[in-house]
Image (cartoon, rainbow, N blue to C red):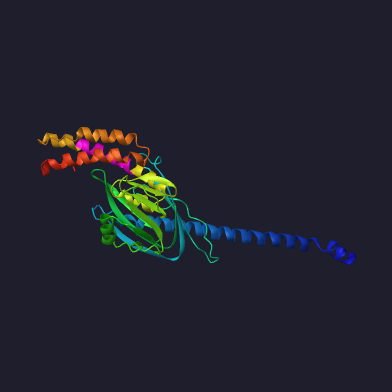
Amino acid sequence: MKFYKKAILGMPFDWMFAIIVGAFILFLAIYFTVNFIQTSEIRQNTETAAIIKSYLDPFETGLASGKSSNVSFRKETRTIMSCNALRNPPFGEQTIRFSDKNLKESFGNEGEAVPIKDKYIFSEEIIQGKNWYVFSIPFFMPFKVSDIIIISSENYCFYNTPEEIEEEIKRLQLININMTNDKKCAGVSVCFYPTSQESNCSIKVNTNSKTVDKDNKKVYYEGNLVYGAIFSSPEIYECNVKRLMNKAAELSMVYNDKIILLERVGCGSTIKGDLTNLINNIKNFDSSAKLKSISALSENIDEQNEAVKPDCKVY
């Protein structure tokens, strides 16, 4: 032991210095290599999120029919969606963050959040899996407000499906939805019923009250928003409904200006006051529970618009 200590004490200083410097250089090399890999991973995942955003562009069809598609990834992916109705006023904003599994079979570093300002994506807050099922469908209130985009990565079992929803699912060829009576169906269970009754289903849709019970929370829907309520988290649903209402208010102001132009060519319109009421109702909109009153007002506007001559229609 004494010999060992003497050997150390007797080691030339330049050797000791070389060992310390070498260890420090090795540490820096490892640190910068790991940091470079992580930075590259974040950059790549940010670029992938931007590609996904671009991929969703065609789902804004501008038509009344909607469309569907399936996406397959080589590796299991995780996408984190968020929504903020107050950012980017008056239309709000969503963000998307992406990551996939690395060689260690764990999810790598998420990319930067990519903002989405012109789309209304209804999904769970975390979309995870190798396969995505995407479809879009228009939303009217009473004119077309936007296409709503639905993204899911799971299979669903629909029980007691209403005829109009069944026809829409078949038309869009949504392969991850099984309309069945088989209780052994493998997937997220969604039950439709006209009255309030107990059910063991994960998601309960009351077609009378137009409510969806999911994750121990209740949201309200009108029209095609039923799909958003089923396939998205309640938080993202409420946020996107608020964003859609804000856009409906902006469009209402545009149509009010159009009425002034139509009046100059002899087209009288009775919906200007109702459009103003619609705008005022939306200003006080704070949850989907207020959709019912707004929907009733929009139906009245639509009836009046349909009653005039084709050349005098506001939309």
Tell me where residue 290 sits by quadrant.
top left
Characterize the magenta stretch by its predominant secondary structure: helix
Toward the viewer: 38 or 147?
Answer: 147
Q: Is residue 148 above or below residue 279?
A: below
Magenta-colored stretch includes residue 246: yes
Magenta-colored stretch includes residue 78: no
Q: What residue occupies the far front of the structure in this picture?
A: 197
Q: Which residues are magenta?
A: 244-257
Residue 146 in view here: yes
Instruction: Using residue 82 as the reference point, say whether residue 30 is left or right of it.
Output: right
Residue 251 in view here: no
Question: At 21% from the left edge and 36% from the top edge, which residue is drawn?
Answer: 256
The quarter in which the N terminus is drawn is: bottom right
Q: What residue occupies the far right of the structure in this picture?
A: 2
Q: How many marks?
A: 0
Return the x and y of residue 238 as percentages of the image width and height.
38, 44
Question: At 31% from the left edge and 41% from the top edge, which residue is drawn?
Answer: 291
Return the x and y of residue 50 as percentages of the image width and height.
40, 55
Return the x and y of residue 202 as percentages of the image width and height.
42, 54
Question: At 25% from the left edge and 39% from the top edge, which residue is drawn?
Answer: 296
Toward the viewer: 262 or 142?
Answer: 142
Q: Is residue 195 above or below residue 252?
A: below
The quarter in which the C terminus is drawn is: top left
Tell me where residue 61 sits by quadrant.
bottom left
Return the x and y of residue 89 as percentages of the image width and height.
37, 39
Q: Is residue 22 above or below residue 225?
A: below
Instruction: Using residue 30 as the reference point, say whether residue 19 is left or right of it.
Output: right
